[in-house]
Image: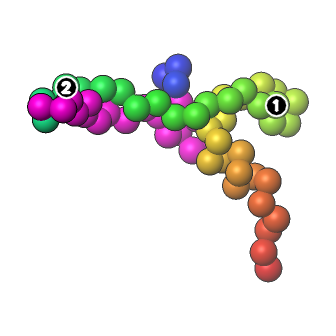
């Protein structure tokens, strides 16, 4: 559970590398994790959650 967002629990996904000859091999697609302090504690948070926290709340 090292590369997982502590807010949305999103982690790495799998996909394919595709060569010029169209051969496919598996690859891991990581998320953009950054360490941020939330309520005084350090947490690994993805960039999508950081953007959502920065948005003003609409009424």
Total marks placed: 2
Outermost residue on the top side: it is: 2
The answer to whether 50 is drawn above or below residue 6 in the figure is below
Nearest the viewer among 16 and 21 is 21
Q: Position of residue 44 (x, y in %)?
A: 66, 29
Residue at horizontal 52 percent and vertical 25 percent from the top: 3
Where are the magenta residues, as a range? 4-21
**Secondary structure of residue under mark 2:** strand
Residue at horizontal 82 percent and vertical 31 percent from the top: 37
Q: Which mark is residue 37?
A: 1
Q: Position of residue 43 (x, y in %)?
A: 71, 28
Residue 45 magenta-drawn? no
Residue 20 magenta-drawn? yes
Crowd band around label 2 with a 10 angstrom C-alpha radius: few (<14), some (14–19), many (20+)? few
* Quadrant including the C terminus: bottom right
Residue 47 in the figure: left or right of residue 19: right
Residue at horizontal 87 percent and vertical 30 percent from the top: 40
Identify the residue under disc 2.
Answer: 25
């Amino acid at each position: 559970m090292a590369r997982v967002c502590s807010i949305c629990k999103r982690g790495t996904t799998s996909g394919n590398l595709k060569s010029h000859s169209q051969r496919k091999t598996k690859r891991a697609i990581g998320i953009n994790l950054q360490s941020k302090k939330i309520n005084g504690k350090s947490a690994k948070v993805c960039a999508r959650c950081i953007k959502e926290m920065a948005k003003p709340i609409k009424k």
